Image (cartoon, rainbow, N blue to C red):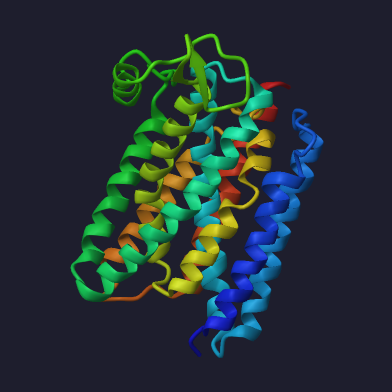
Amino acid sequence: MNVNLLFWIIFIIMVSVMLFIDLYVTDHDGNEKSLKSSAIWSLIWIGVALSFNASLYFLFDNGKEKVMEFLASYLIEKSLSVDNLFVFIMIFQALNIKRINQPHILKWGILSAIVFRIIFIFLGVGLIQNFQATIYIFGVILLYAAYKMLKNALSEEEKVLDLENNRIIKYISSHFKIATSYTGNKFFTKIDGKKALTPLFLALVMIETADIVFAVDSIPAVLAITQDTFIVITSNIMAILGLRALYFVLSGMLDSFKYLKHGVAFILFFVGVKMMIMHFYKIPVTVSLMVIFFTLILSVGISLLLKKKKFI
């Protein structure tokens, strides 16, 4: 059955409560997030997503298929989000953003990301429904994204963010005054009585830009699994929820998931091929879910195993 307005209202209310807890309650004291607290909240948000997924079995007539579609979409979004979080870490390091200020930036980054994702999802679904050739365009985008990620994963060069040659930083710096010695927790300040931007604002703009670029890859990947707007939006938002907590878990574990990029590149390649051949052969969602799940397990397992051997 089609999801009616009541289900959308229930989901919006549920997400609003979760966002309030995630973005305001969990760090209301302004202290730095501890690794233990972040890990616990990460598990809580994953548990909430899986519980919501289980409820889809009763929500839809074809509940079993929708449960698998949601889980496959959620795993894709979550795994790609992990890679994106590493980009956030580089941005904070390059701009010398203190750890205590990072949750504030991520808070607004996540809220903006949800808005942009919903817009992109409706555009993507609309394009596929009205222009079938869009499927092939999205497929090419995914194959190219897989190539870029694999090339990046195989590169031995240390990734450093070049602020001096960054076009976004250059444009903002040429049009606005930047407070280089700012130590507070706001996006705007005053220098000699005139409004100026803080490094926190620069970090927010760069994070939003990175997330938009990331969405260009991730949303077509989910649309290769399903074009059900309800499933695509709910899986995206559920994957975004708790990203702040996950960020602080991963911020000290950059080297622990060395081969995750390889696995995600393969997943992008797989869903790209799935989308390209969709009109000739539709790969069952069960197969897609198994490929995604075992690829992530294998890439994370190899990363941890080789890291352990390195220290023996």
Is 46 situated left or right of 163 in this image?
right
Residue at 49% over, 39% down: 84
Residue 133 x %, y %: 18, 68
Q: Is residue 154 above or below residue 179?
A: below
Residue at 64% over, 60% down: 16
Residue 190 x %, y %: 50, 17
Specify whether residue 109 is in view.
yes
Q: Nearer the viewer, residue 137 or 9?
A: 9
Residue at 49% over, 65% down: 233
Q: Nearer the viewer, residue 120 or 52?
A: 120
Is 201 situated left or right of 300 in this image?
left
Residue at 67% over, 34% down: 248
Is 26 situated left or right of 299 in this image?
right
Residue 75 position by quadrant: bottom right
Residue 220 position by quadrant: bottom left
Quadrant in the picture for the C terminus = top right
Q: Nearer the viewer, residue 258 or 31?
A: 31
Q: Is residue 234 above or below residue 102?
A: below
Residue 167 x %, y %: 29, 24
Residue 127 x %, y %: 25, 68
